Amino acid sequence: MLWGAVVPDGDLYIVREWPNKVPCGEGPYDGPVGEWVTPQGRIGDGQTRGAGKRVGELIRLIRGVEAGLARRLGIEEITVVARGVDKRFGRTPTTATRETSDNLIDNFARGDGEEPMFLTAAPTGEVDADITVINQWLSYEPEKPVVRGINRPRLHICDECQNLLWALQNWEWRGAGDSGGRDALKDPLKDPIDTLRQLLALEPVYLPEGYTGCQEPRGH
């Protein structure tokens, strides 16, 4: 999971990830969970320790992380605008009967004993197109002076998001037509990048204080 915040000039900051490799504060949900993938390419502790949670536990986890972010910012609570989820994973039935067909989005909306949480299926596209979008957010002309709002990346990732940074630095994608493309799609390093793809697919923009355009409380 990733949490992003957009500042008035339109730049996007990835301020938190979960599972996280390094401490992100002193709250109950801020301690390190583990690596998503080890430097040797093996499944990391971050995947095994974070597995098997019920929907209610995930909702508590998400709100706990957001409470930790609010404490670090010195504010009462974070205003969450949209919560994205992988469109296929979010809509895949978890249980089905003749009358109903539950999926992750439905189950979060019910709350599983917690206050309901509303998810949006992120409209991601083909991998090639989404990687181009990530590169556009990161692009700037290094030979020219870095000037805010003119020539610098629009996507910034906090140092604490070590699993995402490691994936961006080490996952290799040469395009769908490449012979190694199938291996790249199965590489667990792709998982954090997929999460970033989903966040960017929601087209995050800065919303002024007091914005009330959302019908339901949502967030990334």
Image: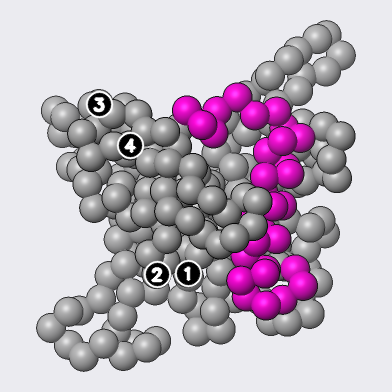
Mark-to-mark CA distance, 3 and 1: 30 Å
Secondary structure of the residue carrying tag 1 is strand
Sequence-wise first label, 1 or 2: 1
- Of badges 2 and 3, the one in the foreground is 2
Sequence-wise first label, 2 or 3: 2
Amino acid at the residue labelled 4 = Val
Amino acid at the residue labelled 3 = Arg
User: Which residue is disc 1 drawn over?
Assistant: 13
Amino acid at the residue labelled 2 = His
Q: Is residue 194 visible?
A: no
Mark-to-mark CA distance, 2 and 3: 29 Å
Highlighted magenta segment, given as a residue range: 48-77
Residue 175 locus on image (x, y percent): 21, 40
Q: Nearer the viewer, residue 141 or 63?
A: 63
User: Which residue is disc 2 drawn over?
Assistant: 156
Q: Is residue 18 above or below residue 95?
A: below
Q: Which mark is residue 37?
A: 4
Mark 2, residues whose alpha carbon is within 10 Å: few (<14), some, or many (≥20)?
some
- Of badges 3 and 1, the one in the foreground is 1
Q: Is residue 121 above or below residue 133?
A: above
